[in-house]
Amino acid sequence: MRALSLTIAVTAALAACKDKPGGPEPAAAPPSAAESVGETASGAEPASAPEQQAPADGESCDVTIAGAVSLKDQTKEVVLGTTHWMSAEEIEATGSQGRLVLDCRGSRVHLMVTEPTDSRPSDVPYGPRKYPVGDKPGALRIVATIGNDSYEATSGSVEVTRWDDDSFAASFSADASKAGASDTIKLTGAVVVPCMPGFGKCKRGQ
């Protein structure tokens, strides 16, 4: 869980600087993440072209959990760290390479969706795509923390239905297991994050 601990530390820093000029800095990936964008992502499927969606009014994250734990949670405490919303100048200045670090901090559930540390630029493209859950390039990791218990998704998918210069929107459905135990849960939900001023590519506020 070392990689997860590092990711959580990074997203905490992102939340602290969410409203500062320049936007939050996405998590840095190891050198292998800088491989050619022309490489084909393994496991991920391009999502079908979505209908035109209205701009997002504000961030939101809805989570429903069933199984060993049953609850529903909703929060507007959502941070998306991504170089896809940064200008080339911002990326060069910060050295950031992370393309997807999503942090939803609800009152009952802390949900994180991240790319594996060894993913490549082509594994998390800018735009709609359906990703399998997993820890290999081309997949996305989901970890839900409920109280003192951590559950990591073992199967399922994350479908990004919108990702452009206006906003990010995705839904997810996954089975997850409790660390060090046999307890399992079913995670479902959806998240919306508008691209806010401070990121170089965002249209809002321009």
Image: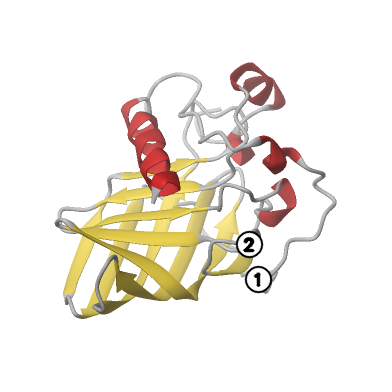
Q: Residue 206, how many percent across, how many down?
A: 56, 27
Q: Where's residue 195, x and y in %?
A: 50, 40
Q: Is residue 74 left or right of residue 138?
A: left
Residue 170 position (above or below residue 39)? below
Q: Residues within 10 Å of mark 2 (few under 14, many from 20)?
A: many
Count of all numbered marks drawn on residues in the image? 2
Q: Position of residue 42 (x, y in %)?
A: 72, 66
Residue at x 44% of width, y 70% of height: 172
Whether residue 1 sits left or right of residue 96 in the image: it is left
Relative to 72, 141 lies left or right? right
**Residue at the location (55% across, 40% down)?**
82
Q: Which mark is residue 67?
A: none
Task: Name the amino acid, label 2.
Answer: Pro
**Residue 34 or 129: which is nearer the viewer?**
34
Asked if labels 1 and 2 touch by Cβ distance under 8 angstroms, the answer is yes
Expressed as whole percent of the image width and height from the top left, the position of residue 45 reads 68, 71
Query: Where 182 sits versus 20, above or below?
Result: below
- Left or right of 132, for residue 77: left
Residue at the far bottom: name it: 67
- How many residues crowd mark 1 within 10 Å: few (<14), some (14–19), many (20+)? some
The residue singled out by tag 1 in the image is: 47
Q: CA distance from mark 2 to mark 1?
A: 5 Å
* Helix, strand or loop under label 2: loop
Residue that appears at 65% across and 58% down: 137
Q: Residue furthest front?
A: 180
Q: In terms of sequence position, does the residue under pointer 2 or pointer 1 come before the other?
A: 1
Instruction: Using the image, determine if residue 97 lies above or below residue 106.
Output: above
The residue identified by callout 2 is 128
Camera-side residue: 199 or 188? Answer: 188
90 shown above or below 39: above
